[in-house]
Amino acid sequence: MRCKTIEKWLSDRIDGELSERKIKVLQTHLESCLSCRSYAAALEIIQDEARSIQKPQVSPSYWAKFTSELKANLSSKKTEKRLARLSVKRWQWAGASAALTLLIIVGLYFLLFFEKPVPEMVVFSYEDSLTQISQEIGRDPELENLFNLVVLASIGESLERSGWQDSPGFQENFILWENLSEEEIRLIESEIKKEEKIEEESDEG
Amino acid sequence: MKAKSLVALSLGLIILSSAVFPAVQEQENELQQRLRTRENIVTLMLLRMTRFLELTEDQTAKIYPLVTRIEKEKMEINRKIARQMQELRMILREADPDPEALRIRIQSLKESREELRSKDAEVEAQLEVILTVVQQAKYLVFMNVFFKELRENLERARNIRGKAAPKKK
């Protein structure tokens, strides 16, 4: 049996509201529990003291006044509490709304003005690059051919930017020519012819 | 009877070779195309690298032949790897693959891979000698810049194909 229950039963016993069966259980518990026995003794002392206090003689008009004052006090306390609760809630709502607005603004700012960091693949040698690109192309001869042409165009652009035509030694650059297929050489040749034609036309014009 | 058998056998061989030869030829073409693309990428890389690392004439004279030689050697190794892979696939296609034959091919493939790695290591070791420390650092940055450019080129190629493809009605 928990002592908390026993304490409640002790109070009920004083009020004469405890059943016979519970009184027996209570007695058994008190015999074995020192803490509850002390509590019961304390209750009895309070009870005796209360009994010894004389009932004051008060007029019925006093009671009527006392009751009305009590009611007025209670209702004003309730209103105060409700107002306090409302104002706290209002502040909480205002704070939450402000925080939410701020969060949305900051979120939009980052979304609009900051690029998402894309996880970047780092390569350490050109072999890594070649392997990666080769895997991306896969077994797709058409894409491979187009990619090769784009690379060739990039070579052309790079050479043009470096002024290779003015460089007398360029034509002897074995790395470039040795690596080109017949088809690629024909492509370069046709491109050079096109450029020459454009130059001639502009000279004539 | 004997003559008839010979004719039948010859016909069978002709039919078989006509079926197998185009497939082999196609594979060889694909390999050739891949190697040619690789050569062009390396050429582009050398050109870009010269600018990015601000190589001197002396450095260029050392690096270009080095990379070209290593590339040729690697190309040979890559051809060998392609051949070994083909053999491996053929063995695996058999109903009951010979474990010993497979073990030999696996071993030779591993050796080829090591050969490739040793070639890369050779380039790196040589670059450490030829380049200054700043250039070595730039080289690492350049590798990633160049890789990005290659990916952009691949994207361009995809776009070109997308535009060239006939639109579906």
Image: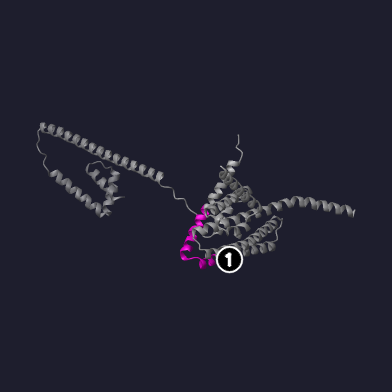
Compared across the picture, whether B132 is left or right of A43 comes to right
Q: Quadrant of residue B126?
A: bottom right
| Residue B110 percent location from the top left of the image | 62, 63
| Chain that bears disc 1 | B
Tell whether position A187 is magenta: no
Tell me the residue at 69%/64% (across/down). B100
Tell me the residue at 69%/62% (across/down). B101
Q: Is residue B87 visible?
A: yes
**Residue neighbourhood size for the residue with mark 1, other residues' Cα within 10 Å, grouped as few (<14), some (14–19), many (≥20):** few
| Residue B39 percent location from the top left of the image | 60, 57
Residue picked out by circle 1: B118
Q: Is residue B159 visible?
A: no
| Residue A34 percent location from the top left of the image | 25, 55
Q: Amino acid at mark 1?
A: Ser
Colour convention: one colour
The span shown in magenta is B121-148
> Regarding mark 1 in the picture, which secondary structure is present there?
helix
Name the one closer to the observer, A96 or A113: A113
